[in-house]
Amino acid sequence: MRDLGQTNSTAALNALLGAGSVFEGKLHFEGQVRIDGTFTGEITTTDLLIIGEGAKVSATINCGSVEIKGDINGNVNASDSIVLRATARVQADIYAPSLVMDKGAVFEGNSRMTGGARAMATVASTDRRERNKKGKGFAYGRELVPSGRSANENGHSEEGDEHPAE
């Protein structure tokens, strides 16, 4: 995962929309950008966007990663990750392969895990259907066993025995 703009971060900040500033329009950028003011419009990047604690953003956001400490209304689509810090107030639909939400963050909307999570869910659903079709009902699917090995490789039988072989 990318560096998410901590105060001790060594990542270079390319632009800052400071507290008290107001911007309306489309923002496209490379590198890390921080918004502490008010922004309305569209934001597009493959890099990191930081929404500061006092920020008020009403936008459609397409980014690599976003760390949210302020207020957001709209939609957020991140190809890497979304982090909602304790001071975040989010009314948006969010899409990302990774979502982190600190205690105290407020989120109202829909969330969807995209990318790798979707592929794993599809495999797990297929395993579940196959177990039910066979009538065996064993409790361990290939993708759901912590070691990453199949149930048989972990010592579990397909006959419904839910305990590892001794």
Image (cartoon, grey):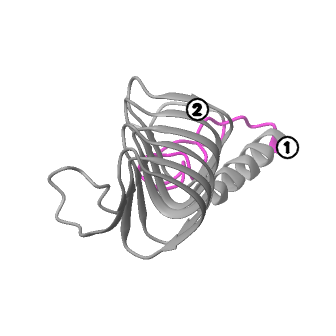
* Place of residue 152 in the rendered image (x, y in percent of width and height, measured from the top left): 54, 51
Q: Which residue is mark 1?
A: 133
The N terminus - image quarter: bottom left
Q: Quadrant of residue 135?
A: top right
Q: Is residue 149 above or below residue 156?
A: below
* Place of residue 73 in the rendered image (x, y in percent of width and height, measured from the top left): 62, 40
Which label number is shown at residue 161? 2
- Number of numbered discs: 2
* Place of residue 41 in the rendered image (x, y in percent of width and height, measured from the top left): 64, 57
For the residue pair 69 and 99, the one nearer the viewer reads as 69
**C-alpha span from label 2 to label 1:** 17 Å
Look at discs 2 and 1 and give the one toward the viewer. 1
**Residue beneath the point at 54% across and 54% down:** 150
Q: Quadrant of residue 107?
A: top right
Q: Main secondary structure of the magenta part?
A: loop
For the residue pair 126 and 96, the one nearer the viewer reads as 96
Callout 2: 10 Å neighbours few (<14), some, many (20+)? Answer: some
- Can I make out residue 43 in this image? yes
* Place of residue 99 in the rendered image (x, y in percent of width and height, measured from the top left): 49, 45
**Do the numbered discs 2 and 1 sit on residues whose CB atoms are within 8 Å?**
no
121 left or right of 45?
right
- The span shown in magenta is 134-159
**Residue beneath the point at 71% across and 54% down:** 122
For the residue pair 17 and 146, the one nearer the viewer reads as 17
